[in-house]
Image (cartoon, rainbow, N blue to C red):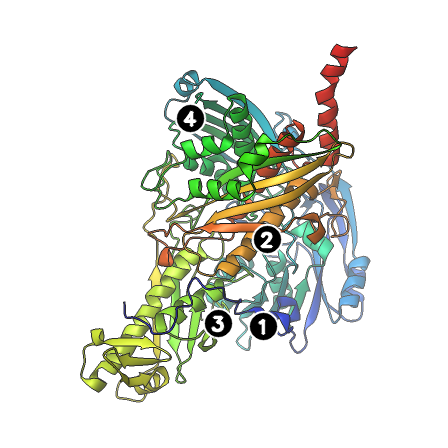
Amino acid sequence: MHSQPQQSILGVDTPQVTARAKVTGRALYAGDYKATGMLHGKVLRSPYPHARIVRLDTSAARALPGVKAVLTGEDAPAALWGAHHKERAVLARGVVRYCGEEVAAVAAISDEIARDALDLIQVDYEELPAILTPEEAMDEEAFGIHPGRDNVGHRIAFERGDVEAGFASADLVHEATYTTHSQYPGYMEPMATVASLDPDGRLVLHTSTQAVNLVRMQVAMTLGLPISRVRVVQATTGGGFGGKIVEDDNQLLAGLLALHTRRPVRLVNNRLEDFQAACASVPEHITLKLGMRKDGTIVAKQVRIIAECGAYAGLSGDVMHVSTMRSDNMHRNPNVRAEATLYYTNNPPRGAFRGFGGTQMQFALNSHIDTMAQQLGLDPVQVHKLNALSTGETSVHGWHIGSTGLRECVDQATQAIGWAEKRQHPNGQGTKRRGVGMAAVMHVSGNRTIGNWDGSTVIVKINEDGRVFIISGECDMGQGAATMFSQIVAHELGLPLSDIHVVAPDTDVSPVAVGTLASRVTMSGGNAAIVAARKARDELFALAAPRWDVAAEALSIGGGAVFVTANPEQRATLAELARQHIWRHGGGGIQVSGSWDPKTVMHDDKLYGNIAPAHSYAAQAVEVEVDTETGQVTVIDSYVADDCGKALNPVAIHGQTNGATVQAMGWTLYEQLHYENGRLANGNFADYTMPTADAVPMLRGGFVETHDPNGPYGAKGASETAILPGAAAIANAVHDAVGVRITDLPITPEKVLAALRAQRAPQGAAHA
């Protein structure tokens, strides 16, 4: 490594390179794109969770002046789409399976005319019986939501070790069932796409997405186009949280309307439509049985999960997979058994959400550990630290732990809120009682389970003015990928950030990439950026070395120039070298490509394999106040300790951690989708209660830097892990405060009051 004279930008608080464009209003979101002759798209959605379409009359809508297309299932491709099961029509044909399913699509010269056209479409439905719970779906006499098959969307089962012997050796065996609910992604920007045809008739989509290549594959396959006839460009994306991977119909409908009208079409969900169309997180019923010795050693674990995917499976099976298996890899327990089943219902489709199934199981597991620690007279901190796998160990599922700061995270978080002292203090005898709780979790940085590739390719192009373009297919949806890429290349080439530009992901020019999911972009994309930047540096050195008749090893780079290390006066700017590279015999621009694919192993048919290059960890400790008269739970203090490997950009990681922490608080205490006979009753931000600034405490947190051997400069993913511990930490704190254990999320005032009444009832009866 050739030294750079200026201070490195790695590990330094760095504003997002996209921030200025956003705060000045210059950033172009998908809904901001405009084109000559652009039409406005609108979608007619089913008002029923399950119904037969008896008659669909679009004649009045088609006759409305200004309407250019009215499409139904008859006009859509016959091909079905979906992440794994190809089971979903672009527009419903013959039957609708959830309230909000797309029935017809309109394109008109204005939003107002498009809305009027929707009102003129006449649909006669024959309402059918609806299955709205997993319990109904698993009934032997239940109809199949999808013809010719039962209502099982996915099933997982495995056993390792001797689970029964493990339970027999335990001093305490505890079993309980936990219920988790769906959470709407709540991103600021709803789904949006502008679809158009280029002069060659190719379909071009400017869209809000986390994965341009996955969108391109899906659109081409579903609309019956060669993949080279589809171009997907990521617009500035206003948040995704897993909800903008590839599970939304928006891009398909926009593309279909553009193909039919041969004109650009803008299709932007309003907020109600986004509530109906976006995949909320997967609801799960988790029955957990754990065996523990009296010193806190976990010796056996059994999990049964019943999960619900809604009308279409999407990525829900992958989410359930994570719930079922990932937490096993935190602990040294060799005896695990699990059975998990995903059921179809006539509810809206569920799918990917930040934490991707980890939140559900970590709520159960951390609540369980807290309960058992109390029964054994132990501090849960002891239990977590005793059982945690160490660096260099291999988990029960074959995961190689290259770095872990779990124990350090537990210590940092609990010490920060005064854990030991507050657990000794009485909780108070008044109406408001305080308590503390903690939870510890793990996540992955990359994941070789969806396909047997988890790599990334980054192109570095040095322009004739010495400035650098970075071209990648990995998407920045607000989490800071563009800034991370810029920091790495700036560090390697000794340039200021202002000389780096990250090109928006565009399938016409960007290398193929998996996309922004599974906390993989810093790991795979960051490593690829290092490879590419060093290749570019080597080309510069090869150009410069003959100038001064020195070996490449005698050169350094920094300050926008290459120079002789022993004599910095002998220097050439990157601009000079880039021009030199072009204007010579056999010359050309400096453009190099770097790829990196982790040496992970796809799991086998028994789900055994080293599937992730690194694992991130976090612990959270909270203090809550419970009002015993109203049941209201208020988080008074929170501290999240994050093992992110190496904090490449501390301020960005703090922002991600704080955002994840607030999302967890919302899921735990406030957010709940309310359905009435399958119809969403609170599809807006007025009625769907998300936490606001006055509902959360000053958010505190810190890092544990473990310097992972596979990560770029030791870094790991740092955007998802912090959402995992919140629910259990709060539930454990509520129990510490008032002695009631809430196992059914969200923790509402009504549930707290009911539990307090139940707690008092036996005492009252005995007294009477």
Q: Amino acid at mark 1?
A: Arg
Calculate the distance from the C-alpha at mark 3 to the C-alpha at mark 2: 26 Å
Of labels 1 and 2, earlier in sequence is: 1
Of labels 2 and 4, earlier in sequence is: 4
Of labels 1 and 3, earlier in sequence is: 1
Q: Is 735 placed left or right of 611 in the picture? A: right
**Which residue is tagged 4?**
297
Indicate which disc residue 659 carries.
2
Please identify the quarter of the rendering in which residue 390 is found.
Answer: top left
**Which residue is tagged 1?**
20
- Image coordinates for residue 751, horizontal then vertical, percent: 72, 31
Q: Secondary structure at mark 4?
A: loop
Residue 63 lies, with reference to residue 680, above or below; the image says: below
Calculate the distance from the C-alpha at mark 2 to the C-alpha at mark 4: 34 Å
Please identify the quarter of the rendering in which residue 388 is found.
Answer: top left
Q: Amino acid at mark 3?
A: Val
Indicate which disc residue 503 carries.
3
Calculate the distance from the C-alpha at mark 4 to the C-alpha at mark 3: 51 Å
Q: Amino acid at mark 4?
A: Thr
Residue 291 lies, with reference to residue 641, above or below; the image says: above
